[in-house]
Amino acid sequence: MTEQPITVIATIRIRPGHERAALDAIRHCVAQSRLEKTNISYQCHRDIGDGDIFVFVERWASPAALAEHETTPHFRAMAEVFRTALAEPLHVRITREI
């Protein structure tokens, strides 16, 4: 049986003064992630009511594809920026379409 794709919904809040570094890391990661062969789609949205909140919506071919993505240089670079840029813990949901 073939695994079904997964959707990741991740929400972050950026700490004041860290916006530039976070945006640069996000934009780079989005662009590079879209090139990964197991990526179906990868987007990051900014909350229109609170500009410090960003929501990632990602579709991956499988949980294994997501795990592989998390080892890439672009993901690790973004995660490193987030170590000091996040105002609160990252909130992640991994889902499957019903």
Image (cartoon, rainbow, N blue to C red):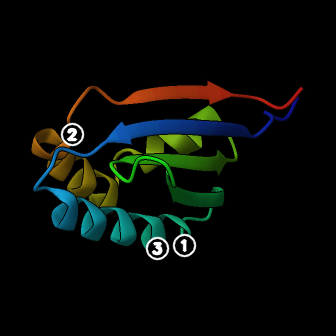
Q: What residue lies at 60% left-to-right and 28% top-to-bottom?
A: 94
Q: Tell me the number on the disc at residue 89.
A: none
Q: Amino acid at mark 2?
A: Leu
Q: Are marks 3 and 1 in contact (CB under 8 Å)?
A: yes
Closer-to-camera residue (49/39): 49
78 versus 25 height, above or below? above
Give the image location of residue 92, x and y in percent.
Answer: 48, 28
Dot 3: element: helix
Question: Among all residues in the image, which is located at the extreme front?
Answer: 49
26 versus 57 height, above or below? below
Dot 2: element: loop
- Which residue does the numbered mark 1 point to in the structure image? 35
Q: Mark 3 or 2, which is nearer the eye?
A: 2
Q: Amino acid at mark 3?
A: Ala
Q: CA distance from mark 3 to mark 1?
A: 7 Å
> Dot 2, crowdedness within 10 Å: few (<14), some or many (≥20)?
many
Q: Is residue 8 left or right of residue 12?
A: right
Q: Quadrant of the N terminus?
A: top right
> Dot 1, crowdedness within 10 Å: few (<14), some or many (≥20)?
few
Which mark sits nearer the N-terminus, 1 or 2?
1
Q: Quadrant of the C terminus?
A: top right
Q: Tell me the number on the disc at residue 86.
A: 2
Q: CA distance from mark 3 to mark 2?
A: 21 Å
> Dot 3, crowdedness within 10 Å: few (<14), some or many (≥20)?
few
Give the image location of residue 77, x and y in percent.
Answer: 21, 57
Q: Tell me the number on the disc at residue 31.
A: 3
Q: What residue lies at 24% left-to-right and 28% top-to-bottom?
A: 88
Q: What residue lies at 26% left-to-right and 55% top-to-bottom?
A: 78
